[in-house]
Amino acid sequence: MSATPAPQTRRVIAAAVLVPVIAALALWAFAWPAARTAPRDLPLGVAGPTAATAQVQERLKGAAGSEGAFDIHRYADEAAAREAIEDRTVYGAVVVGDDGPRLLTASAASPVVAQLLQQAVAAPTPADGAGVETVDVVPAPASDPRGAALNASVLPLALAGIAAGGVVTVLGLRGTRAVAALLGASALTGLAAAAIGHSWLEALTGDWWAEAAVLGLGTLAVGGAVAGLAALIGTAGLGLGAGVVMLFGNPFAGAASAPELLPEPAGFIGQLLPPGASATLLRSVSYFDGAAATGPALTLTWWAALGLGAVLLGGALKNRTASAEGRVRAPALTG
């Protein structure tokens, strides 16, 4: 019996090793943030007299179990604290008045954080007390109180972007044709997603067209990046772009909880990638009238612009290479 050729043996070994490595990387990327979910510099407001709010801060430190759990913002009164919540400066606030503390939350910003704040603020209260009154300043929609629909939209939009970039590459579209295909696919995806999330499920409650634009921009950011990498480095760019989005962008997005609940640097990285920026921007547009939308909007715009620029550059380079090869072959044929 003849021995297996060396190249085939190396391929077998590579396949046997590569799959477990990818599986381990995927498990790490998804399981690590989930297992280490906890508040880390979570923006929280306190309002009221200085002496009373100082006591609240000390109690919050003890309840959270970590000194760096909350990033405390001080406000003069409840009105200022409410405005900060609506502007997405803080996730909630503890207002200390003559009748005791009151907790302001925003379940639309994160139902998980709203529940966490209720536990943290209620934990140090006396056992015989009536409990802390909680007011949901910006509530999640009644049709989706847990924010499940917005969280579930992250993966499909990422897959739609990867599919758009892959189809453009497989069909051999280049330059402006590839850009037009990506723009068209992303726009239609945004319209379809808004129709489902807003019109049907009623999980999104903001301006319909603004939501569709956000959903389309998120798809374009992923699709442009994937197609741009493929245009510059070949089909390997498809795997690279899809891998970054799926292994890092999706689990680090923080859509199910909040970026500040993920271990660092996962929360920071997630907001620099399209899935995390898309979730944050969609939440701002749908529930907070566009508050704090500038950062994630710029992130998605840069991804889309760089991706489409790479598509145009890759197409131009390939056309130039094809023209140069044609000029080289022409003399040989005439000779």
Image: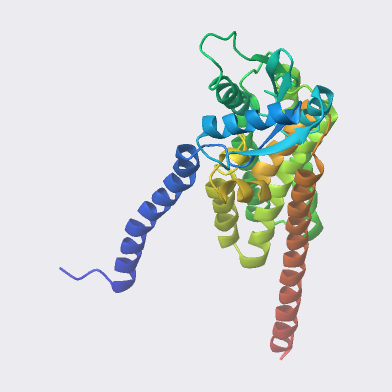
Which quadrant: the C terminus?
A: bottom right
User: Which of these two is toward me, 53 or 287?
Assistant: 53
Which quadrant: the N terminus?
A: bottom left
In the image, farthest residue toward the left = 1
Q: Is residue 134 visible?
A: yes
Horizontally, residue 249 falls left or right of residue 12, namely: right
Relative vertical location of residue 16 with respect to residue 81 in this rendering, above or below: below
User: Which of these two is toward me, 43 or 317?
Assistant: 43
In the image, farthest residue toward the front = 51
User: Which of these two is toward me, 289 or 242?
Assistant: 289
Horizontally, residue 196 falls left or right of residue 266, namely: right
Callout count: 0
Relative vertical location of residue 147 with respect to residue 28 in this rendering, above or below: above
**Picture coordinates of residue 107 (x, y %)?**
67, 23
Q: Is residue 93 visible?
A: no
**Picture coordinates of residue 53 (x, y %)?**
69, 29
Q: Residue at x 77, y 68 (%)?
A: 316
User: Which of these two is toward me, 257 or 44?
Assistant: 44
Relative vertical location of residue 188 with respect to residue 243 in this rendering, above or below: above
Q: Residue at x 61, y 21 (%)?
A: 146
Horizontally, residue 160 falls left or right of residue 183, namely: left
Quadrant of the image occupied by residue 172? bottom right
In the image, farthest residue toward the bottom = 335
**Picture coordinates of residue 288 (x, y %)?**
79, 28
Quadrant of the image occupied by residue 49? top right
**Picture coordinates of residue 101 (x, y %)?**
68, 19
